[in-house]
Image (cartoon, rainbow, N blue to C red):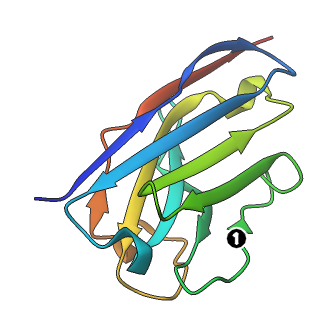
């Protein structure tokens, strides 16, 4: 059974940093394209960024570029999201997702496994 478990969320102030982790079990992580999505209250879940399993550079949504960094440790079956210079508008539940595709899809339908999410709250 596939499990994706996010951790690292919390309450921080604007300008602070957080690192989220997503530990994956039950699938071949080293051959999974991984992504981070987020969902703010009253809004649809949106793509934050993703990284494929063939060694390509991560891709990010415009709001994440320059502030967020996605990385992966295949030896630990773990995906990371380093978030710097956090803003109140980054407040959301952050989800990791996995796909067997090489392509980094920015839509929800591109992923077959999801974590339960971790809450990030940024106060002003």
Q: Reply above or below: 117 against 18.
A: below
Please indicate whether residue 110 sits to the left or right of residue 91 in the image: left
Identify the residue at horizontal 67%, vertical 56% (top origin).
Answer: 70
Quarter the N terminus occupies: bottom left
| Residue most extreme to the left | 1
Q: Nearer the viewer, residue 89 or 31?
A: 31
Identify the residue at horizontal 40%, vertical 75% (top origin).
Answer: 32
Identify the residue at horizontal 86%, vertical 31% (top origin).
Answer: 85
Give coordinates of residue 105: x percent, y percent.
Answer: 52, 78
Quarter the C terminus occupies: top right
Q: Reply above or below: 99 against 10.
A: below
* Mark 1 crowd level (few <14, some 14–19, many ≥20, 10 Å Cα): some
Give coordinates of residue 72: x percent, y percent.
Answer: 57, 60
Identify the residue at horizontal 80%, vertical 27% (top origin).
Answer: 87
Return the residue at label 1.
58
Q: Nearer the viewer, residue 86 or 29?
A: 29
Q: Reply above or below: 67 against 9.
A: below
Give coordinates of residue 109: x percent, y percent.
Answer: 35, 73
SS class, disc 1: loop
Q: Nearer the viewer, residue 33 or 63?
A: 33
Please indicate whether residue 87 sits to the left or right of residue 121 in the image: right
- Give the number of marks: 1
Q: Nearer the viewer, residue 79 or 94?
A: 79
Determine which quarter of the picture holds residue 110: bottom left
Give coordinates of residue 10: x percent, y percent.
Answer: 56, 17
């Amino acid at each position: 059974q596939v499990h994706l478990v996010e951790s690292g969320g919390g309450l921080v102030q604007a300008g602070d940093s957080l690192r989220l982790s997503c530990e994956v079990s039950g699938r071949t992580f080293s051959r999974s394209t991984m992504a981070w999505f987020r969902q703010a209250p009253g809004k649809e879940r949106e793509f934050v960024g993703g990284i494929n399993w063939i060694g390509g550079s991560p891709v990010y949504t415009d709001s994440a570029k320059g502030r967020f960094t996605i990385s992966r440790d295949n030896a630990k079956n773990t995906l990371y999201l380093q978030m710097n210079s956090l803003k109140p508008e980054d407040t959301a539940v952050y989800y990791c997702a996995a796909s067997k595709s090489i392509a980094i899809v920015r839509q929800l339908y591109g992923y077959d496994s999801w974590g339960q999410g971790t809450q990030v709250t940024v106060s002003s």
